Image (cartoon, grey):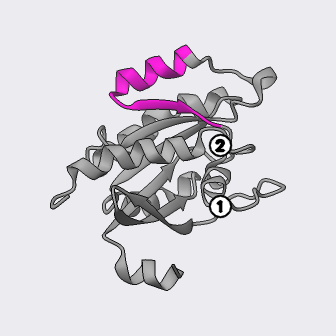
């Protein structure tokens, strides 16, 4: 079916926001889910990036809006405004950068101050393919996620490992909470 058919006939619209420090691979993460070629070099997001994708869930057409705000401190107000209307959040950190891991609680607090998000928030450890550069163990990240009351998954935005699974975990957590479903 054509893309216009999906646009006119989507049953649900879900807003998903990607949070995390700069250079953690948020844009790589969304590009991988969109089946786009990943960028060949790092380019910092200025302001916000946006993507849309249609998926099928239990015979329903879901339109996903994926919002990728900059992780830079000067854009925090923009990020907060996008959190208010969202259905789900990925908090992404780099498994190769301890400082990005140490800021996870800041991003979770920002999310909670905009709207409580335990049921629709997933902690994502990115770059699991770079095992030789890893600074955070699976157990350490899982313990943090458990203490925050959210799910945890490791992905590689570079090769696409677990990217679809992360999005489907989030969709499966969001959909039962929607009315009329």
Residue lying at the far left in this picture: please name it.
180
Q: Secondary structure at mark 1?
A: loop
Q: Quadrant of residue 81?
A: bottom left
Q: Quadrant of residue 85?
A: bottom left
Q: How many marks?
A: 2
Quadrant for the C terminus in the image = bottom left
Residue at image position (45%, 55%) is 17
Residue 43 counted in the magenta span: no
Mark 1 and mark 2 in contact (Cβ < 8 Å)? no
Residue at image position (53%, 14%) is 139
Viewer-closest of 29 and 48: 29
Viewer-closest of 77 and 65: 65
Viewer-closest of 153 and 82: 153
Q: Dot 1: within a 10 Å radius of its alpha carbon, few (fewer than 14), some, or many (20 or more) residues?
A: some
Residue at image position (29%, 46%) is 113
Start and end of the magenta stretch? Answer: 139-155
Percent x, y for residue 51? 55, 68
Residue 147 counted in the magenta span: yes
Percent x, y for residue 91? 49, 42
Disc marking residue 24: 2
Residue 135's place in the image compared with 86, above or below, is: above
Q: Secondary structure at mark 2?
A: loop
Viewed as shown, does residue 67 lie left or right of 177?
right
Disc marking residue 54: none
Disc marking residue 45: 1
Q: Quadrant of residue 155?
A: top right
Viewed as shown, does residue 176 lie left or right of 164?
left
Residue at image position (29%, 52%) is 175
């Amino acid at each position: 079916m054509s893309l216009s058919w999906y646009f006119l006939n989507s049953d649900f619209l879900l807003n998903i926001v990607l949070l995390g420090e700069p250079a953690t691979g948020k844009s790589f993460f969304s590009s991988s889910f969109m089946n786009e070629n990943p960028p060949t070099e790092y380019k910092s997001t200025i302001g916000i990036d946006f993507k849309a994708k249609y998926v099928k869930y239990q015979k329903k057409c879901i339109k996903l809006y994926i919002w990728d705000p900059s992780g830079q401190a000067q854009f925090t107000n923009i990020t907060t405004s996008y959190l208010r209307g969202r259905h789900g959040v990925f908090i992404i950190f780099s498994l190769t950068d301890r400082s990005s891991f140490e800021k996870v609680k800041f991003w979770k607090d920002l999310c909670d101050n905009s709207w409580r998000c335990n049921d629709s928030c997933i902690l994502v450890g990115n770059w699991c393919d770079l095992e030789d550069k890893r600074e955070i163990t699976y157990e350490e990240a899982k313990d943090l996620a458990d203490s925050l009351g959210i799910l945890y998954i490791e992905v590689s935005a570079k090769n696409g490992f677990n990217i679809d699974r992360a999005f489907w975990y989030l969709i499966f957590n969001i959909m039962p909470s929607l009315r009329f479903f």
